[in-house]
Amino acid sequence: MTNPLPRAFYARSAVEVAPDLLGKVLVREIEGRRLTGRIVEVEAYLGSEDAASHAFRGPTPRNRSMFGPPGHAYVYLIYGMHHCLNIVTGPEGDGQAVLIRALEPLEGIEIMRARRGGVPDRRLTNGPGKLCQALGIDKRLDGHDLCLGETLWLEAGRPPAEPICAGPRVGVRGDDLALNRPWRFYLKGNLFLSPTPHNRLPCQTLP
């Protein structure tokens, strides 16, 4: 029996939802097998008021899922080879989303190892493209309803014991405001964070 997070959880600003996603469990079901990971790093993107967001200039064929109802997946391809998973948040039509940047593997680790070509466990899901490869997430799941509890969804998990850090997002483009907004959130000291140098800097912890 699945227990997906309710739509009301996602129907808030991406900047509110993003830190609340830390510690939640991402579930991918493939042929009856659960592949799961604890969310340890995310980034918030705030639509038309955020120059770093794919939604900044309005809807396109690529980003149309961002403008749908909250609680859906927005999956896109970067560099022609890596998929990235985002969670749509906020009111329908706003184009808000949260990028899932890193997971701590929990279930189905042997399948993740096979999908990732035998890399060390710390590198199975420590990046947005890596976690999508490990869990078999691709464009076919773009627009998927995460509240159905089928194929791909999120569960509550346990509240994180680690401090939550906030800092600038990684590799974004846009104006100075977009480059410096502290909208990347992560669990301090977690072994499965993405390898960006940002995660080794002193962080601003949330209360």
Image (cartoon, grey):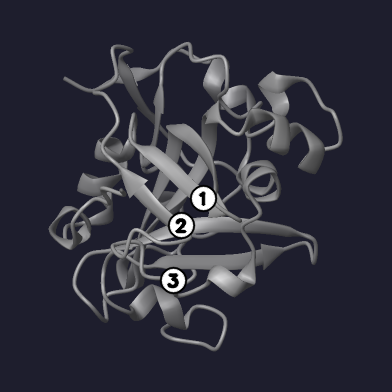
- Residue 144's tag is 3
Name the quarter where the C terminus is drawn.
Answer: top left
Q: Position of residue 97 (x, y in %)?
A: 37, 60
| Circle 3: residue type | His
Q: How far is the residue under mark 2 from the one under mark 1?
A: 5 Å
Q: Is residue 20 left or right of residue 116?
A: left
The mark tally for this picture is: 3
Q: Are circles 2 and 1 on residues that touch, CB within 8 Å?
A: yes
Depth check, front residue: 191 or 149: 149
In the structure shown, which secondary structural element does the residue marked by tag 2 occupy? Answer: strand
Q: Position of residue 73 (x, y in %)?
A: 43, 65
Q: Is residue 98 left or right of residue 141?
A: left
Q: How far is the residue under mark 2 from the one under mark 3?
A: 8 Å
For the point 19% across and 62% down, the residue is: 7
Q: Position of residue 34 (x, y in %)?
A: 52, 43
- Residue 100's tag is none
In the structure shown, which secondary structural element does the residue marked by tag 1 occupy? Answer: strand
Q: Are circles 3 and 1 on residues that touch, CB within 8 Å?
A: no
* Residue closest to the far right: 117
Q: Earlier in the sequence, mark 2 or mark 3?
A: 3
Which dot, 3 or 1, sits closer to the camera? Answer: 1
For the point 66% across and 26% down, the residue is: 195
| Circle 1: residue type | Arg
Depth check, front residue: 70 or 90: 70
The residue wearing badge 2 is 152
Q: Are circles 2 and 3 on residues that touch, CB within 8 Å?
A: yes
The residue wearing badge 1 is 28
Q: Position of residue 134 (x, y in %)?
A: 68, 43
| Circle 2: residue type | Leu
Q: How far is the residue under mark 3 from the one under mark 1?
A: 12 Å
Position of residue 136 relative to residue 142, above or below, is above
Q: Earlier in the sequence, mark 2 or mark 1?
A: 1
